[in-house]
Image (spheres, rainbow, N blue to C red):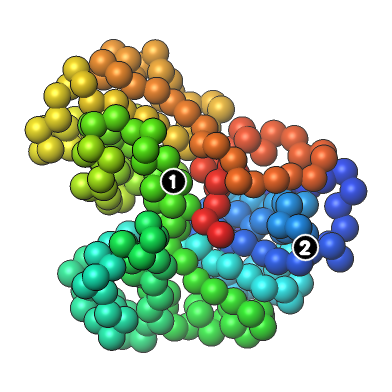
């Protein structure tokens, strides 16, 4: 396992001030946010190359993960399902997810309520990985990684126009959402290896939803500072397109530098 570590921290960082941790497991990298008692971020450990199977080893080596404080774990994985709140029943979690992918025999299921209980995001974690984390943290909770992006979109829904497509880029994948008249109509995760993949999936969705190419607005989040995906490039294909950073619900102690260069959506907004 390559353990290249990038550290971002406040000028007066003290590990003893850590009151909680937020772990974001992306498909091939990991971000650990240490927060103080006021929920301000005081330190971040970012592993740009990371394998989920190595988490157990990292738990005993990373200084932040050695601190036994309440931990929230967000898993960015394709194994998730959105279920209408009125239809949701926790006893059917495995059934919901078996439509998406084949599941490990031993899985722990969890769900998160969004949009005033109108939507439940159902996902899972392998039992072995859950046990490793529970052995390290006395208090731990699990969430699907899309919670942050979706919670933001629901908060911003009344600023959306009639036909909206919204993208969040992350680690060789992207979340793709569509709203029609401020109601969520599509949400999924897709693999992308080049910028043309983003173009392909958005154009397919425009066609599937019968959106007007001249009226639909495309908004892209999660673009790193050094990227081939630019507004100038996107404007060659979409009439109304923009690259944005989300409004922030995250606070930082003084001294953080270059953290926003990562382009991570969760640097600005986290489900909490």
Q: Earlier in the sequence, mark 2 or mark 1?
A: 2
Quick check: 30 left or right of 235?
Answer: right
Residue 92 in the image, given as x and y percentages of width and height: 24, 81
Which of labels 2 and 1 is toward the front? 1
The residue at 67%/64% (across/down) is: 21
Image quadrant in which you'd find residue 10? top right
- In the rendered view, tell whether residue 210 sits above or below residue 32: above
Q: Circle 2 is placed at which residue position?
A: 37
Q: Are marks 2 and 1 in contact (CB under 8 Å)?
A: no
Identify the element where label 2 is drawn: loop
Q: In which quarter of the image is the C terminus?
A: bottom right
- In the rendered view, tell whether residue 212 sits above or below residue 19: above
Identify the element where label 1 is drawn: helix
Q: For marks 2 and 1, give the CA distance.
A: 25 Å
Residue 223 in the image, given as x and y percentages of width and height: 48, 32
State whether residue 81 appears in this view: no
Please give the label number shown on residue 250. Answer: none
The residue at 72%/73% (across/down) is: 69
The residue lying toward the viewer, choosing from 105 and 220, is 220
State whether residue 126 appears in this view: yes
Residue 66 in the image, given as x and y percentages of width and height: 75, 72
- In the rendered view, tell whether residue 139 sits above or below residue 31: below
Residue 98 in the image, given as x and y percentages of width and height: 21, 74
Q: Circle 1 is placed at which residue position?
A: 155
The residue at 88%/58% (across/down) is: 14
């Amino acid at each position: 396992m390559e353990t290249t570590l990038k550290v971002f921290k406040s000028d007066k960082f003290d590990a003893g001030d850590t009151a909680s941790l937020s772990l974001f497991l992306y498909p091939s990298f990991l971000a650990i946010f240490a927060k103080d008692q006021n929920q301000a971020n005081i330190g971040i450990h970012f592993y740009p190359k990371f394998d989920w199977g190595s988490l157990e080893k990292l738990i005993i080596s990373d200084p932040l993960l050695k601190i036994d404080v309440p931990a929230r774990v967000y898993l960015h994985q394709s194994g998730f399902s959105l279920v209408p709140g009125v239809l949701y029943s926790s006893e059917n979690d495995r059934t919901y997810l078996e439509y998406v992918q084949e599941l490990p025999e031993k899985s722990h299921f969890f769900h998160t309520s969004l949009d005033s209980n109108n939507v439940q995001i159902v996902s899972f974690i392998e039992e072995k990985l859950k046990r490793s984390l529970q052995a390290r943290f006395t208090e731990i909770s699990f969430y699907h990684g899309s919670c942050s992006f979706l919670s933001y979109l629901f908060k911003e829904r009344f600023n959306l126009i009639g036909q909206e497509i919204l993208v969040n880029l992350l680690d060789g994948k992207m979340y793709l959402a569509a709203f029609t008249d401020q109601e969520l109509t599509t949400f999924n995760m897709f693999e992308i290896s080049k910028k043309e993949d983003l173009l392909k999936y958005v154009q397919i969705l425009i066609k599937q939803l019968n959106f007007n190419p001249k009226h639909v607005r495309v908004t892209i989040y999660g673009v790193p500072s050094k990227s081939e995906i630019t507004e100038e490039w996107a404007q060659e294909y979409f009439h109304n397109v923009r690259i944005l950073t989300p409004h922030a619900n995250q606070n930082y102690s003084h001294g953080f530098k270059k953290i926003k260069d990562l382009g991570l959506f969760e640097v600005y907004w986290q489900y909490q």
